[in-house]
Image (tube, helix red, strand yellow):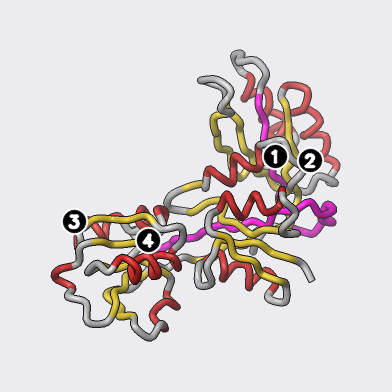
Amino acid sequence: MLKIGYLGPEGTYSSYASKLYGKNNLRIPFDTINSVLNSLKLSETDKVIVPLENSINGSIVEVLDFLASKNDFRISAELNIEINHSIYCLNNTDLDKIETIFSHPQALAQCYDYLLKNFKNVNQRASNSTADAYNDLVNSKVNGAFIGPPWMKDKENVQVIDENIQSVKNNLTRFVVIDTGKENQRTNSDKTSIVISFNEDSPGSLFKSIKPMSIKNINMTKIESRPTKEKLGNYYFFIDLEGHIDDLLVKECLDEIKKVSTLKFLGSYPKFS
């Protein structure tokens, strides 16, 4: 039985994603995304499932930084999950006197328009997860509310204030499974992830790196930069491209990229459909 780490507690979208990936595994919750990722380094888990990017708020930088760092961990699978946020309070709460709204920072940001319109002058408090937001409200003893997933309405002492309050209705989060497992075999629809960087900043470095994809007609589906944290102006570039590393054109493309940049292979895995 595999040990799968995820951002807990039970009831988060990460918990839901871990069940979709494999409900028969031993699922282990952690308090923060960094704790989830570090569980791999400490051999507390065999795999972890974490959010990598959201269609509204972009990438989760802790996960990008972990993937770019010097380790042997790779992405082995991905899942895209629709995110629907609801706002709740505890039973007998006076809705006109709500003082504080609790949730994960990503959820608060994704519901910005709704909160601005309906709770403009209400304090916002960050929680470790959307499920933890409920516990934070209960423990705070304040007249407040929390934002969480739809299934939180099933809690006995919870009252729904409003549903589907995210600013953009097409709200998807891409979750990835990270492990040290063997490379996935090719399928009919694969994706390869890499991260590249440059020892020296020079004109055209990035162009020279991505040019082989254009020449070989390989579709690049994502490119994103993050600071290397070594010095100002140095960046990692995270790239997703269609195809598997065992595809001849992809292999040749990566070999060309290695000639002009430092490349770290992050995995080839089936595209989520």
Indicate the secondary structure of the residue bearing disc 2.
Answer: helix
The residues bearing labels 4 and 2 have C-alpha atoms spaced at a distance of 41 Å
Q: What stretch is highlighted in magenta?
A: 169-197
Q: In this view, does 109 lie to the left or right of 214?
A: left
Sequence-wise, the earlier of marks 1 and 2 is: 1
Indicate the secondary structure of the residue bearing disc 4.
Answer: strand
| Picture residue at 82% right of the left edge, 38% below the top | 251
Residue 148 forms part of the magenta stretch: no
Q: Position of residue 196 (x, y in %)?
A: 67, 31
Q: Is residue 208 left or right of residue 101?
A: right
Which residue was labeled with disc 1?
194
Sequence-wise, the earlier of marks 4 and 2 is: 4
Q: Is residue 44 above or below residue 147?
A: above
Are circles 3 and 2 on residues that touch, CB within 8 Å? no
Nearest to viewer (mark 3 / mark 4): 4
Q: In which quarter of the image is residue 272?
A: bottom right
Nearest to viewer (mark 4 / mark 2): 4
| Picture residue at 74% right of the left edge, 46% below the top | 73
The residues bearing labels 3 and 2 have C-alpha atoms spaced at a distance of 50 Å
Q: In which quarter of the image is residue 151?
A: bottom left
Which residue was labeled with disc 3?
120
Given residues 213 and 108, the one toward you in this image is 108
Given residues 183 and 255, the one toward you in this image is 183
Which residue was labeled with disc 4?
103
The residues bearing labels 1 and 4 have C-alpha atoms spaced at a distance of 32 Å
